[in-house]
Amino acid sequence: MQTRNLIALGAAALCGVAAYAQAAYPAWAEGNTYTAGTYVSYNGHDYVALITHTAYVGAGWTPVVTPTLWKDLGPSSGSATPVPTATPKPTTAPTSAPTATPKPTAAPTVTPTPAGCTFTNWTEGVIYQLGAVVKYLPNGQFYKVVQVAGNGSDATNPTISTWYWQPTTCGGVTPAPTATPKPTSTPVPTVTPTPAPGCNYVTWTSGVIYQLGTIVKYPANGQYYKEVAVGSNGSDATDPTISTYYWQPTTCGNGPTPVPTAVPTPGPTPVPGKLGKIVGGYWPYWPSSPVRIKDVNPNYNLIYLFAAVPEGGAPGTTGRVIWNAPGNGRGAADNLVSDIQYARGVQGRRIILSVGGAGNGMSFPNRTKSQNFVDSIVGIYNQLGGFDGLDWNTFEGSQAPDTGEMIWISQELKRRYAGFIISAPPAPWNSVDKTFCQTMVQSGALDYCAPQYYDGPNLADPAYVVNSVNEWVGLIGETHLVVGLGVNSATNYMSIDQAVSTWKQVKAAHPNLLGAFDWQIGTDEEQGWPFANQLKPLINP
């Protein structure tokens, strides 16, 4: 998930530069942004930046411990005599020196779209450069490389590595990601008059943006719906059977009002009290055929619905958030409400709504936006029949959290719903996130924080995780800490063996840790549920 923009890395090759072994280079310091080719001194050695990056305060990414970011030029000699660096490899590597990441023998065919957008079909093992747009064939969606490391996209999968990739359109303006991609130009549906005089409707079509007052006929149930409210872009391509903020059942003529799709009365939340050990997983909306909630491996006792996003895009124009329907390939959308309530009432799981995510930070500069946020959460709560908590994923990259208002929002939701859980998945190295979590926990507004140890350079290093967890325990305590892991064969993720070993180490040092989560449930299913089956007995025996 990388739901957070952890660091800003630019891709830049070092071509024909000379390294000067002299102590006159400026001293390396946290908080600075270094472009590729910049020289610094640190602990008596000179270094040259291999890629553009920011040395965030608190991250501890000194030149000594980050060989992917810096090249050690040796001891500072005070001499200005240039020492040539090794000639970098050309973009197209010779056949005698293949890179560690496999590259296809032929470059993917570039396909121009009528709107002038150029994309390639994503191919496993290919390294894409900053700004590249790909089409992911399994779901037909487009993704853009928004950040790079030392080797471009590091051959990552755009549906997994959200640190490198973000959903996009292949056309004009890139909108905030939604469950159903909005067309670059809104189709104009054919208006079909009904026998009743004066009533016009259109057949509802997925992905179409409708305007205020439009009446649609929903082909799946034959009923009519009228758009009664709009977002920043009309109906925001929402589904009238799901998004009751935008749509209400209506008639199209003089006939009886159709019976709206049944939505169960919100069921009771699990008995309030101390949280048990958490074995959690994120369930994103965007896969075309996600596993149904009720069919998620039973070892998961907490499921994050990922994610509701800010209305109008980041940082939110109104404060409201919009829940996007999941893919329906296996019936996850059609059965979402009943599956959530079955998971809560019969299976005894906790369901938490995550808000925000990568590229979807939110601001709460005033009480009006905060109240709108609360109202929209209440609306989604009623729409889904109830859920058990909120996951703050809204303080994104440079988007500093409005802690005071977020405390008010959290406490207001806890007041409305008994036992309501409030969580947050911070960047483990970020000093702002550390202060936020500590303040929220101390105020009683936050039940736990779950730092994300994946999808960024060095974050999945077991040694880093162990040391970082020690620091977080000191900040908020064992019982308020969940460890966020990513088990995947992709770059900057752990193998299941590494995850098991890491958990055993942190659990031995801190036996009262609250639990761990995995990014993401769909990937765990594809791999045969290694996280659920191997971590659950260790976390919650």
Image (cartoon, rainbow, N blue to C red):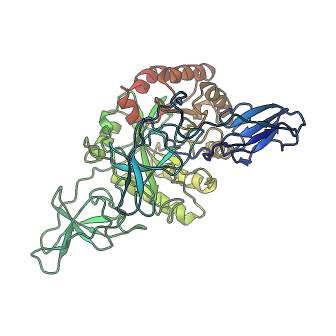
Where does the image place residue 314, in percent across and percent down from the top left?
Answer: 52, 59
Locate residue 520 relative to residue 400 in the image: left or right.
Answer: left
Locate residue 92 relative to residue 266 in the image: left or right.
Answer: right
Q: Identify which residue, 381 or 353, lies in the foreground.
A: 353
Where does the image place residue 416, in percent across and percent down from the top left?
Answer: 46, 52
Locate residue 415 relative to residue 50 in the image: left or right.
Answer: left
Q: Identify which residue, 439 or 393, lies in the foreground.
A: 393
Where does the image place residue 118, in percent across and percent down from the top left?
Answer: 42, 55
Residue reaching furthest right? 78
Residue reaching furthest bottom? 198
At 49% from the left and 33% from the top, the residue drawn is: 275
Residue reaching furthest left? 195
Q: Identify which residue, 41 or 343, lies in the foreground.
A: 41
Q: Identify which residue, 482 or 512, lies in the foreground.
A: 482
Relative to residue 213, is residue 396 depicted above or below?
A: above
Q: Is residue 87 visible?
A: yes
Q: Quadrant of residue 139?
A: top left
Q: Quadrant of residue 525?
A: top left
Where does the image place residue 346, in percent across and percent down from the top left?
Answer: 31, 34
Relative to residue 390, is residue 314 depicted above or below?
A: below
Locate residue 161 relative to residue 242 in the image: left or right.
Answer: right
